[in-house]
Amino acid sequence: MRHKDICIVGGGLVGLSAALALSRLGYSINLIEARSLGALQDGTIPAALDARSLALSHATVKIFTALGLWESIESLAAPIKEIHVSSSGRFGVTRLLADELNLEAMGYVVEYHLLFEQLLSAVKLEKNVELLSPANVEDLDCQPQGVALNIMVEGEPQKLMADLLIVAEGASAAIRERLGVTISTTDYHQVALAANVETEAPFSGIAFERFTPEGPMAMLPLTESRYALVWTQHPERAQQLLKCSDRDFLQELQKRFGYRLGVLRAVGQRASFELKLSRAQPLVTMNAVLIGNAANTLHPVAGQGFNLAMRDIAVLYDQLKGLNLRSEQLGIHLEKYQQLRMTDQQQTVQAGHGLVKLFSNNWPLLNHARAAALTALDLMPPLKQEVSWRGMGFGQGLSTLMRGHL
Ligand SMILES: Cc1cc2nc3c(=O)[nH]c(=O)nc-3n(C[C@H](O)[C@H](O)[C@H](O)COP(=O)(O)OP(=O)(O)OC[C@H]3O[C@@H](n4cnc5c(N)ncnc54)[C@H](O)[C@@H]3O)c2cc1C
C-alpha cells in the first residue's frame, strides 16, 4: 500500500492547479484522473478537447505568478482592456475600463486547452506529484485518521492511503456521494454554446457581455483577431445552432451581436454545455475537502467558476502551510478553510445567479430594473470600481498566493 500526504481525485484545471500549489508546500501527492492525460498531451485531442476559453481574474494571475507559471500562460493569453455590458434592445450600457483602474488589463483570456496543457506539463515536472491516469476510484474509506482508496490504474488494481483527500471531480458525483455530501441544484434550462470566432475588426481588447432574452452572450478577445464566444440559448435552439452550417451560424450570431466587431468571418468547432448551478454542502467532511466544480458549478455569465476555485486553492494553501497532516490540527484547519470560503463563494454564486435571473427573461416589469442596474453602474465610478475589484477576485482579501508569492 502506497502512502501519500494528499490524494487529489480529478485532474481537470482545478485538480492540476491544486496539485501544483500544494506540492510547493512539500506535500507528496497522488493525482488521480479518469481520462488518459498522456493521450491529451501528445496532441491527439488538442483544441477538440474543449472549445471554451476562460477569462482569468487578477487574483488568478497572481496565483499563477506565485506558482511560476504566469509568464508562459501570459504569452498565450489576450488582455481585456475594456468590458462592455449591455442589454439587447434596451437602454443602458456600462463600460468597465482598465485605464480607469490604473491597470494593464481587467483580466486575461486564454483558451482552455492551452491552459490545460500548461498546467499538465508543469504537474509532470513536479517531483512531489505522482499522476495516475487513466485511473478510477473503485472504493473509498474515509476515516478521521486518513483515507484508503482502491483504484484501478490502466486496468491494474492498486491500494493508496492519504492523510487528506481533495475532491476535484467536477460535475461527477462518484466521490461526493460516497462521502455523503449532498448538492443543491438549480437547472437554468439553458445551454451555453462555445466557439472561437474570427472577426473583421483587429484585436481591440474589448470584452462584450450582452444580455439577450434567451440568456447572456459573451464575446471575449483572443489573440489574432479572434473572439471566444459563449452564447446562452434554450436547449432546442442550441441544438439547431450546433448542427447548422458555419454560414448560417455566423449569420444568426451577427444578427444577435451586431457589427461591433465588423463582419464575423469564420467560426471554429462548436461545443455545448448544459447550464446548472450546483452547490455542495458541506465542503469539508472528515479529512476530505471539495473544491472547484465539485464544490460549486456556476453559470458562465460572469466567468467566475475557475477563478473562484483558484481562490479556494489559495486559501487551502494557507491553511495547510506547515501543518502536520496527521495531527488533529488538520480537522481544525479544514473547518477554518470552510468558514473562510463561505462569504466569497456565497457572494460569487449569488452575483452570477442574480445577473442570469435579472436579464434572462422578457418580463416588462424588469426592464426598468435592468436599465437602471446598468446605468447606475456606468454613472457611479466607486461602485464600478467595487464591482471590478470583486470581478478581479480580490473581494475577500488576500491570501499568500494572491500576493504573488509562495
Ligand atoms: C462555456 C463556459 C465558459 C466558462 N468560462 C469561464 C471563465 O471565463 N472564467 C472562469 O473562471 N470560469 C469559466 N468557466 C468555468 C470553468 O470552466 C470551470 O469552473 C472549471 O473548468 C472547472 O474545473 P474542474 O477541474 O473543477 O472540473 P472539471 O473540468 O469537470 O474536471 C474534473 C475532472 O475530474 C475527472 N474525474 C471525475 N470523476 C473522477 C473520478 N471518480 N476519478 C478520477 N477522475 C475523475 C474528470 O475526468 C475531469 O478531468 C466556464 C465554463 C463554461 C462551461
Image (cartoon, rainbow, N blue to C red):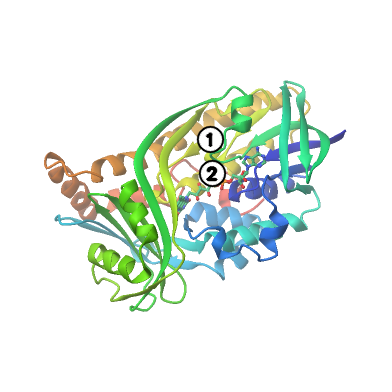
Q: Residue furthest right?
A: 1
Is label 1 in contact with label 2 (beta carbons under 8 Å)? yes
Total tally of numbered discs in the picture: 2
Coordinates of residue 229 in the picture (x, y in percent): 39, 61
Which residue has dot 2 on it?
309
Amino acid at dot 1: Ala
- How far across and how far down the image is residue 272, in percent? 43, 53
Above or below: residue 359 compared with residue 112: above
Which residue does the image show at 58% across and 64% down from the upper left?
Answer: 114
Q: Is mark 1 within 8 Å of ligand 1?
A: no
Q: Secondary structure at mark 2?
A: helix
Q: Which residue is mark 1?
A: 295
Decide if ligand 1 comes within 8 Å of the CB at mark 2: yes
Q: Position of residue 273 (x, y in %)?
A: 44, 49
Residue located at (61% from left, 58% from top): 116
Can the viewer see residue 154 in this picture?
Answer: yes
The 10 Å Cα crowd at callout 2, few under 14, some 14 to 19, many 20 or more, is: many
Of circles 1 and 2, the one toward us is 1
Q: Please state which of residues 208 and 241 is positioned toward the viewer in this rendering.
A: 241
